[in-house]
Amino acid sequence: MNIANRIVTLDEFIIRKESEFPFASGELTGLLRDIGVAAKIVNREVNKAGLVNILGVAGVENSTGDTVQKLDMFANEKLIECLKNSGECCGIASEELEDFIPIPAVATKEAKYVVLFDPLDGSSNIDVNVSVGTIFAIYRRVSDSKGDVTLEDFLQAGTELVAAGYVSYGTSTILVYTTGSGVNGFTLDPSIGEFCLSHRDIKIPARGNYYCVNQGYYLKFDIEMRRYIDYCSDLNLGLRYIGSMVSDIHRILFQGGIFLYPNTRKYPQGKLRLVYECNPIAFIVEQAGGKAIDCQLRRILDQKPTQLHQKSTIAVGSPDMVDEMKAFVERYAAHNLS
Ligand code: AHM
Ligand code: MG
C-alpha cells in the first residue's frame, strides 16, 4: 500500500519523530499521548454539550442527580487527571487554576516537563454550539529536579518551548502540534478512537484574504491600530472573527490572514494570556512559517513572563501581513510623533 495513504496514528507519528526531539526518546511520547487521551475525553463531552441544557444547566443537578460541571472545569480536570499517567509531567499551570500545581512522581520516574494549558478556550461559545479549543504548552523544568517545581519553571520565554499544540473541537476534532520541527495535524477518527495524520507539515500562506479582529472594539483601539484596520478594509480584505482563538488561528494556518487582539480600555494589556494562549499559538504559527508579535511590535516568543496569568496583545498569522502591519504601525506612529 502507498505509505502516503496509509493511516498514521498520532502515537505512531510521535514515536517515528522521536529522533528529532532533542531530549531522551519516549519522554515526549508519554506527554503527548496523555494530552491526546484527554482531548478524546473532552471531545466526547463537548459534543454532547447541547444535551446538558436538556439534562440541566451547568452547576445544577441533572436528571441523574449529579452536578453538571461547567465544561471548562471538566476539561481542566480531565487534562490534569490524564497528565498524571505518563509520569513525565512534574507540574501544571492552567487558565482555570489561580496557581500552578506540582504533580506527584509516578514510581521512581523523575519527571522533567511542565505543561501549561487553557483547557477550553473560547468558552463563551460553548452554549451556542460554536467551536472551542484546548491550547497546551510544554517546557522542560529549569528548577532542581530533586525538589518540587517552582514558579520559575512556568515563567520561561516562549523560545524555551519544547512542544506546543491545540485541539480544535469543530466540525471534526483536530489536534495540531509542533516540537520545533514543523507543524502537523491529526484528525480524530471516532470509529477507531485514534487521532490520524491528516495535515502533514502545515505551511501558512504568505498572505490571506481575511483579517481577524473584534471589530466591535474598533473605537477603543489605539489610533495606529484603527488606521491599520482601515487599511485592511481598503484592501477589500474580508473580516472573519469566530471569538475562539483556536478556531480563528486554525483557519488562518490554512487560508492565511492576520489575527489581532490589541489593547483596549477594558484590556489595557490585551485580553489573551501570554504563557498558555499567546506563546503556544505563536510557536505553532512561527513553525508553520508565520509571525507573531505584540502591539508594541515585539516578538511574542521573546517576551519573558513575570506572572502566570499575565496578558499580552498579539498580532499573529501570515508573515507578509504581520510585516505589513508592523511597517504600517511604525510609519504611522513615527508620522504621528513627528
Ligand atoms: P477565554 O479563554 O476566556 O475563552 O477567552 C479567550 C477568548 C479567545 O479564544 C478569543 O479569541 C477571545 O477570547 C475573544 O474575546 P472577545 O470576546 O473579547 O473578542
Ligand atoms: Mg482562553
Image: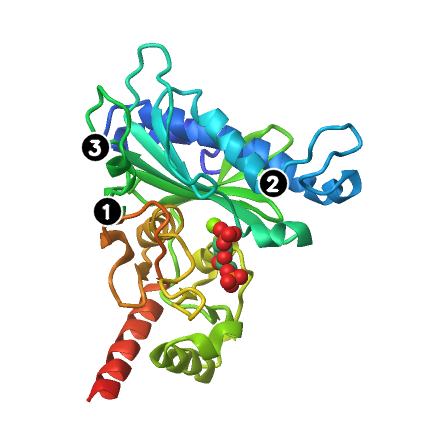
Q: CA distance from mark 2 to mark 1?
A: 31 Å
User: Type of residue at label 2?
Assistant: Leu
Q: Nearer the viewer, residue 241 or 72?
A: 72
The residue shown at (32%, 59%) is 292
Residue 71 numbered mark, or none:
2
Q: Nearer the viewer, residue 184 or 64?
A: 64
Q: Look at mark 3 in the image and give the residue it sits on.
A: 142
Give the colour scheme of this rendering: rainbow
Relative to 140, residue 323 above or below: below
Q: Look at mark 1 in the image and give the residue it sits on.
A: 159
On whether ligand 2 comes within 8 Å of the CB at mark 3, the answer is no
Give the mark nearest the N terminus, 1 or 3: 3
User: Type of residue at label 3?
Assistant: Val
Relative to 81, residue 338 above or below: below
Q: CA distance from mark 1 to mark 3?
A: 14 Å
Relative to 156, residue 290 above or below: below
- Relative to residue 261, is residue 132 drawn left or right? right
User: Type of residue at label 1?
Assistant: Thr
Callout 1 touching callout 3 (CB < 8 Å): no
